[in-house]
Amino acid sequence: MDIKTFRCELEAGIPKISQQINGGNSSVYKGHLPNGMTLAIKEYKGDKIRVERMLSREVGSIKFLRNFGIKNIPEIVEIQQELGLLIYLWIEGKEPHPDSKSMGELIDFCTSLKEIYSLENSFENSIDAVFSLGEIESQIFNRIQDLEKTFSSNEVNILCSNLREKLISYAKIKRNITFINKTFSVSDLGTHNMIRSKENYFFIDFEFFGLDSVNKMVGDFVLHPKNNFDQIDISRFISSISNEFRWDPTELMEILPLLTLKWALIAFMRSFKEDSHKGIVKIGNSSIDKSLGTQYLKYFDLGGHIGADNSVQSFCLFRGIMDQL
Protein backbone atom coordinates (compact mmCIF):
# COMPACT_ATOMS: atom_id res chain seq x y z
CA MET A 1 0.00 0.00 0.00
CA ASP A 2 1.42 3.35 -1.09
CA ILE A 3 1.51 5.97 1.68
CA LYS A 4 0.23 8.50 -0.88
CA THR A 5 -3.07 6.60 -0.97
CA PHE A 6 -3.48 7.27 2.73
CA ARG A 7 -2.65 10.94 2.22
CA CYS A 8 -5.35 11.28 -0.40
CA GLU A 9 -8.11 9.12 0.98
CA LEU A 10 -8.16 8.84 4.78
CA GLU A 11 -10.64 11.15 6.46
CA ALA A 12 -8.89 10.79 9.83
CA GLY A 13 -5.80 12.61 8.59
CA ILE A 14 -2.39 11.93 7.08
CA PRO A 15 -0.78 9.00 8.90
CA LYS A 16 2.93 8.30 8.99
CA ILE A 17 3.41 4.57 8.47
CA SER A 18 5.90 2.92 10.82
CA GLN A 19 5.12 -0.78 10.57
CA GLN A 20 3.60 -3.33 8.21
CA ILE A 21 2.25 -6.71 9.36
CA ASN A 22 1.43 -9.25 6.65
CA GLY A 23 -1.17 -11.95 7.20
CA GLY A 24 -2.80 -14.60 5.06
CA ASN A 25 -5.91 -12.58 4.25
CA SER A 26 -4.80 -8.99 4.90
CA SER A 27 -1.97 -6.61 5.69
CA VAL A 28 -2.10 -4.17 8.60
CA TYR A 29 -0.20 -0.87 8.68
CA LYS A 30 0.58 1.06 11.84
CA GLY A 31 -0.13 4.73 11.16
CA HIS A 32 0.55 7.77 13.36
CA LEU A 33 -1.54 10.95 13.06
CA PRO A 34 -0.21 14.40 13.99
CA ASN A 35 -2.76 14.59 16.84
CA GLY A 36 -1.15 11.58 18.54
CA MET A 37 -3.74 9.01 17.49
CA THR A 38 -2.32 5.67 16.31
CA LEU A 39 -4.24 3.75 13.68
CA ALA A 40 -4.35 0.19 12.42
CA ILE A 41 -5.02 0.38 8.67
CA LYS A 42 -6.20 -3.01 7.44
CA GLU A 43 -5.95 -3.79 3.73
CA TYR A 44 -7.69 -6.98 2.58
CA LYS A 45 -6.19 -9.33 -0.01
CA GLY A 46 -7.86 -10.97 -2.98
CA ASP A 47 -10.10 -10.03 -5.88
CA LYS A 48 -12.62 -7.20 -5.61
CA ILE A 49 -15.56 -9.43 -4.67
CA ARG A 50 -13.58 -11.24 -1.96
CA VAL A 51 -12.25 -7.97 -0.52
CA GLU A 52 -15.74 -6.46 -0.41
CA ARG A 53 -17.11 -9.59 1.28
CA MET A 54 -14.42 -9.72 3.97
CA LEU A 55 -14.55 -6.00 4.73
CA SER A 56 -18.35 -5.95 4.93
CA ARG A 57 -18.41 -9.05 7.14
CA GLU A 58 -15.77 -7.71 9.53
CA VAL A 59 -17.45 -4.31 9.89
CA GLY A 60 -20.83 -5.93 10.49
CA SER A 61 -19.35 -8.41 12.98
CA ILE A 62 -17.54 -5.77 15.04
CA LYS A 63 -20.61 -3.55 15.20
CA PHE A 64 -22.80 -6.54 16.10
CA LEU A 65 -20.52 -7.69 18.94
CA ARG A 66 -19.94 -4.20 20.34
CA ASN A 67 -23.69 -3.71 20.43
CA PHE A 68 -23.83 -6.65 22.86
CA GLY A 69 -21.11 -5.33 25.12
CA ILE A 70 -18.03 -7.08 23.70
CA LYS A 71 -15.25 -4.54 24.17
CA ASN A 72 -12.02 -6.53 23.75
CA ILE A 73 -12.21 -6.27 19.95
CA PRO A 74 -11.12 -3.54 17.46
CA GLU A 75 -12.74 -0.10 17.61
CA ILE A 76 -13.54 1.19 14.12
CA VAL A 77 -12.43 4.71 13.23
CA GLU A 78 -13.16 4.79 9.50
CA ILE A 79 -14.26 2.59 6.60
CA GLN A 80 -12.92 2.99 3.05
CA GLN A 81 -15.09 0.56 1.11
CA GLU A 82 -13.77 1.43 -2.36
CA LEU A 83 -10.15 1.01 -1.30
CA GLY A 84 -10.78 -2.17 0.64
CA LEU A 85 -9.55 -0.56 3.86
CA LEU A 86 -10.77 -0.75 7.44
CA ILE A 87 -9.22 1.71 9.89
CA TYR A 88 -9.43 1.15 13.63
CA LEU A 89 -7.56 2.24 16.73
CA TRP A 90 -4.19 0.57 17.11
CA ILE A 91 -4.04 -2.01 19.91
CA GLU A 92 -0.53 -1.96 21.36
CA GLY A 93 0.72 -5.38 22.39
CA LYS A 94 1.83 -8.70 20.97
CA GLU A 95 0.53 -12.15 20.18
CA PRO A 96 0.22 -14.14 23.42
CA HIS A 97 1.89 -17.48 23.99
CA PRO A 98 -0.30 -20.60 23.66
CA ASP A 99 -0.44 -21.15 27.42
CA SER A 100 -2.99 -21.73 30.17
CA LYS A 101 -3.83 -18.03 30.49
CA SER A 102 -4.53 -17.46 26.79
CA MET A 103 -6.54 -20.70 26.72
CA GLY A 104 -8.71 -19.34 29.54
CA GLU A 105 -9.29 -16.17 27.53
CA LEU A 106 -10.24 -18.21 24.44
CA ILE A 107 -12.74 -20.25 26.42
CA ASP A 108 -14.25 -17.12 28.00
CA PHE A 109 -14.59 -15.47 24.59
CA CYS A 110 -16.31 -18.53 23.11
CA THR A 111 -18.65 -18.56 26.09
CA SER A 112 -19.50 -14.88 25.55
CA LEU A 113 -20.36 -15.56 21.90
CA LYS A 114 -22.50 -18.52 22.94
CA GLU A 115 -24.41 -16.33 25.41
CA ILE A 116 -25.15 -13.78 22.69
CA TYR A 117 -26.45 -16.58 20.46
CA SER A 118 -28.57 -18.01 23.30
CA LEU A 119 -30.47 -14.71 23.44
CA GLU A 120 -31.82 -15.67 19.99
CA ASN A 121 -29.95 -12.91 18.19
CA SER A 122 -29.57 -13.43 14.46
CA PHE A 123 -26.53 -13.01 12.22
CA GLU A 124 -25.38 -14.50 8.93
CA ASN A 125 -23.77 -17.92 8.78
CA SER A 126 -20.00 -17.85 9.06
CA ILE A 127 -18.00 -18.31 5.89
CA ASP A 128 -18.00 -22.07 5.10
CA ALA A 129 -20.34 -22.84 8.01
CA VAL A 130 -21.39 -26.49 8.22
CA PHE A 131 -24.31 -28.08 10.06
CA SER A 132 -23.97 -31.66 8.79
CA LEU A 133 -21.38 -34.10 7.47
CA GLY A 134 -23.01 -33.83 4.04
CA GLU A 135 -22.30 -30.09 3.87
CA ILE A 136 -18.61 -30.69 4.60
CA GLU A 137 -18.47 -33.36 1.88
CA SER A 138 -19.94 -30.89 -0.61
CA GLN A 139 -17.41 -28.20 0.33
CA ILE A 140 -14.54 -30.67 -0.07
CA PHE A 141 -15.73 -31.78 -3.52
CA ASN A 142 -15.92 -28.13 -4.60
CA ARG A 143 -12.41 -27.42 -3.30
CA ILE A 144 -11.03 -30.45 -5.13
CA GLN A 145 -12.57 -29.19 -8.37
CA ASP A 146 -11.12 -25.71 -7.81
CA LEU A 147 -7.65 -27.11 -7.13
CA GLU A 148 -7.79 -29.31 -10.24
CA LYS A 149 -9.01 -26.47 -12.44
CA THR A 150 -6.58 -23.86 -11.09
CA PHE A 151 -3.42 -25.99 -11.18
CA SER A 152 -3.92 -28.47 -13.99
CA SER A 153 -1.04 -30.96 -14.17
CA ASN A 154 -0.74 -34.73 -14.10
CA GLU A 155 0.60 -34.65 -10.54
CA VAL A 156 -2.20 -32.41 -9.29
CA ASN A 157 -4.79 -34.59 -11.04
CA ILE A 158 -3.41 -37.67 -9.26
CA LEU A 159 -3.49 -35.80 -5.94
CA CYS A 160 -7.10 -34.75 -6.50
CA SER A 161 -8.09 -38.28 -7.46
CA ASN A 162 -6.51 -39.51 -4.23
CA LEU A 163 -8.43 -36.91 -2.24
CA ARG A 164 -11.72 -37.93 -3.86
CA GLU A 165 -11.06 -41.58 -3.00
CA LYS A 166 -10.38 -40.70 0.65
CA LEU A 167 -13.54 -38.62 0.81
CA ILE A 168 -15.76 -41.26 -0.81
CA SER A 169 -14.29 -44.04 1.35
CA TYR A 170 -14.93 -42.12 4.54
CA ALA A 171 -18.41 -40.99 3.48
CA LYS A 172 -19.46 -44.60 2.83
CA ILE A 173 -18.94 -45.63 6.45
CA LYS A 174 -20.49 -42.52 8.00
CA ARG A 175 -24.14 -41.58 7.92
CA ASN A 176 -25.05 -37.95 7.22
CA ILE A 177 -25.16 -36.64 10.78
CA THR A 178 -26.77 -33.26 11.47
CA PHE A 179 -25.10 -30.96 14.01
CA ILE A 180 -27.65 -29.51 16.41
CA ASN A 181 -25.47 -27.35 18.66
CA LYS A 182 -24.84 -23.92 17.14
CA THR A 183 -23.00 -20.78 18.19
CA PHE A 184 -21.47 -17.59 16.87
CA SER A 185 -17.91 -18.32 15.80
CA VAL A 186 -14.92 -16.24 14.64
CA SER A 187 -14.01 -19.23 12.39
CA ASP A 188 -10.28 -18.57 12.89
CA LEU A 189 -9.85 -19.02 16.62
CA GLY A 190 -6.42 -18.97 18.24
CA THR A 191 -3.61 -16.87 19.67
CA HIS A 192 -2.61 -15.81 16.14
CA ASN A 193 -5.74 -13.61 16.19
CA MET A 194 -5.24 -12.29 19.71
CA ILE A 195 -3.25 -9.39 21.15
CA ARG A 196 -2.04 -9.26 24.73
CA SER A 197 -1.91 -5.63 25.83
CA LYS A 198 -0.43 -5.56 29.33
CA GLU A 199 -2.88 -7.78 31.25
CA ASN A 200 -5.73 -7.44 28.76
CA TYR A 201 -6.45 -9.76 25.84
CA PHE A 202 -8.03 -8.54 22.60
CA PHE A 203 -9.48 -10.56 19.71
CA ILE A 204 -8.97 -9.43 16.11
CA ASP A 205 -9.91 -10.54 12.57
CA PHE A 206 -13.65 -11.07 12.16
CA GLU A 207 -13.89 -11.34 8.37
CA PHE A 208 -15.21 -14.93 8.63
CA PHE A 209 -17.41 -14.45 11.72
CA GLY A 210 -20.96 -15.80 11.88
CA LEU A 211 -23.23 -18.62 12.95
CA ASP A 212 -21.71 -22.09 12.82
CA SER A 213 -21.92 -25.53 14.42
CA VAL A 214 -20.01 -26.11 17.64
CA ASN A 215 -18.57 -29.21 15.97
CA LYS A 216 -16.87 -27.17 13.26
CA MET A 217 -15.73 -24.43 15.65
CA VAL A 218 -13.93 -26.96 17.84
CA GLY A 219 -12.71 -29.00 14.87
CA ASP A 220 -11.16 -25.97 13.17
CA PHE A 221 -9.47 -25.01 16.42
CA VAL A 222 -7.95 -28.49 16.80
CA LEU A 223 -6.77 -28.51 13.17
CA HIS A 224 -5.39 -24.97 12.85
CA PRO A 225 -1.65 -25.15 12.11
CA LYS A 226 -0.94 -22.20 14.44
CA ASN A 227 -2.73 -23.54 17.52
CA ASN A 228 0.33 -24.94 19.23
CA PHE A 229 -1.22 -25.68 22.63
CA ASP A 230 -0.12 -28.67 24.69
CA GLN A 231 -2.37 -31.68 25.22
CA ILE A 232 -3.58 -30.47 28.62
CA ASP A 233 -4.90 -27.22 27.16
CA ILE A 234 -6.41 -28.92 24.09
CA SER A 235 -8.30 -31.31 26.39
CA ARG A 236 -9.29 -28.40 28.62
CA PHE A 237 -10.73 -26.51 25.63
CA ILE A 238 -12.81 -29.48 24.47
CA SER A 239 -14.02 -30.27 27.99
CA SER A 240 -14.95 -26.63 28.71
CA ILE A 241 -16.86 -26.24 25.45
CA SER A 242 -18.64 -29.51 26.17
CA ASN A 243 -19.75 -28.29 29.59
CA GLU A 244 -20.63 -24.72 28.57
CA PHE A 245 -22.47 -25.65 25.37
CA ARG A 246 -23.99 -28.96 26.53
CA TRP A 247 -22.27 -30.52 23.54
CA ASP A 248 -21.25 -34.15 23.13
CA PRO A 249 -17.50 -34.15 22.31
CA THR A 250 -17.69 -37.66 20.83
CA GLU A 251 -19.26 -35.98 17.78
CA LEU A 252 -15.84 -34.42 17.16
CA MET A 253 -14.45 -37.79 16.07
CA GLU A 254 -17.07 -37.89 13.30
CA ILE A 255 -16.15 -34.54 11.84
CA LEU A 256 -12.36 -34.32 12.29
CA PRO A 257 -11.34 -36.65 9.43
CA LEU A 258 -13.50 -34.74 6.95
CA LEU A 259 -12.33 -31.36 8.23
CA THR A 260 -8.77 -32.64 7.90
CA LEU A 261 -9.30 -33.22 4.17
CA LYS A 262 -10.69 -29.71 3.89
CA TRP A 263 -7.68 -28.23 5.70
CA ALA A 264 -5.39 -30.23 3.40
CA LEU A 265 -7.06 -28.62 0.39
CA ILE A 266 -6.77 -25.15 1.93
CA ALA A 267 -3.06 -25.77 2.52
CA PHE A 268 -2.45 -27.14 -0.99
CA MET A 269 -4.23 -24.20 -2.62
CA ARG A 270 -2.25 -21.67 -0.58
CA SER A 271 1.16 -23.27 -1.15
CA PHE A 272 0.54 -23.84 -4.87
CA LYS A 273 -0.41 -20.17 -5.27
CA GLU A 274 2.81 -19.16 -3.51
CA ASP A 275 4.82 -21.38 -5.87
CA SER A 276 3.03 -19.87 -8.88
CA HIS A 277 3.90 -16.36 -7.68
CA LYS A 278 7.55 -17.50 -7.49
CA GLY A 279 7.43 -18.37 -11.18
CA ILE A 280 6.82 -22.11 -10.96
CA VAL A 281 4.69 -22.79 -14.03
CA LYS A 282 3.81 -26.44 -13.41
CA ILE A 283 2.92 -27.76 -9.99
CA GLY A 284 4.72 -31.08 -9.56
CA ASN A 285 5.51 -33.56 -6.82
CA SER A 286 8.11 -31.30 -5.20
CA SER A 287 5.43 -28.65 -4.57
CA ILE A 288 3.02 -31.29 -3.29
CA ASP A 289 5.54 -32.94 -0.98
CA LYS A 290 6.64 -29.72 0.71
CA SER A 291 3.08 -28.42 1.18
CA LEU A 292 1.49 -28.51 4.61
CA GLY A 293 -1.38 -30.27 2.85
CA THR A 294 0.72 -33.44 2.71
CA GLN A 295 1.10 -33.32 6.49
CA TYR A 296 -2.67 -33.08 6.84
CA LEU A 297 -3.05 -36.18 4.67
CA LYS A 298 -0.67 -38.06 6.99
CA TYR A 299 -2.80 -36.89 9.92
CA PHE A 300 -5.84 -38.29 8.09
CA ASP A 301 -4.23 -41.59 7.02
CA LEU A 302 -2.67 -42.36 10.41
CA GLY A 303 -5.71 -41.35 12.46
CA GLY A 304 -3.62 -38.57 13.93
CA HIS A 305 -6.60 -36.99 15.65
CA ILE A 306 -6.71 -39.89 18.10
CA GLY A 307 -4.16 -39.35 20.86
CA ALA A 308 -3.30 -41.29 23.99
CA ASP A 309 -6.26 -42.85 25.82
CA ASN A 310 -8.47 -41.97 22.82
CA SER A 311 -8.13 -38.25 23.59
CA VAL A 312 -8.28 -35.76 20.72
CA GLN A 313 -4.81 -34.86 19.46
CA SER A 314 -4.39 -31.57 17.61
CA PHE A 315 -2.72 -31.29 14.23
CA CYS A 316 0.12 -29.28 15.76
CA LEU A 317 0.85 -31.97 18.36
CA PHE A 318 0.74 -34.70 15.68
CA ARG A 319 3.05 -32.72 13.43
CA GLY A 320 5.51 -32.20 16.28
CA ILE A 321 5.66 -35.94 16.90
CA MET A 322 6.14 -36.68 13.18
CA ASP A 323 8.99 -34.16 12.98
CA GLN A 324 10.81 -36.04 15.72
CA LEU A 325 10.63 -39.38 13.90
Image (cartoon, grey):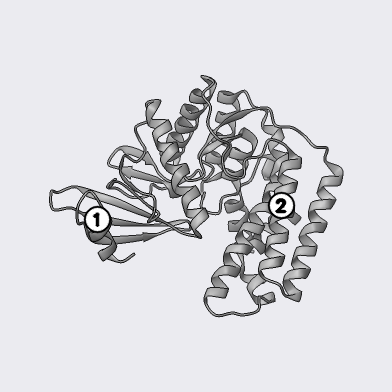
Q: Residues within 10 Å of mark 2 (few under 14, many from 20)?
A: many
Q: Label 1 to label 2, Cα distance in Å? A: 40 Å
Judging from the image, what secondary structure is the residue with disc 1 in?
Answer: strand
Q: Can see residue 257?
A: no
Q: Position of residue 308 (x, y in %)?
A: 67, 44
Q: Which residue is drawn at 54% across and 70% down?
A: 274
Q: Where is residue 68 in the image (x, y as percent from the top left)?
A: 40, 25
Instruction: Name the residue carrying label 1.
Output: 31
Residue sitting nearer the eye, 13 or 90: 13
Amino acid marked by disc 1: Gly
Q: Can see residue 163?
A: yes
- Name the quarter where the C terminus is drawn: bottom right
Q: Which of marks 1 and 2 is nearer the N terminus?
A: 1
Amino acid marked by disc 2: Ile
Q: In which quarter of the image is residue 62?
A: top left
Residue sitting nearer the eye, 104 or 89: 89
Q: Where is residue 144 in the image (x, y as percent from the top left)?
A: 72, 59
Q: Position of residue 215 (x, y in %)?
A: 64, 36
Give the label on residue 140, or none.
2
* Left or right: 54, with 180 as reference point: left
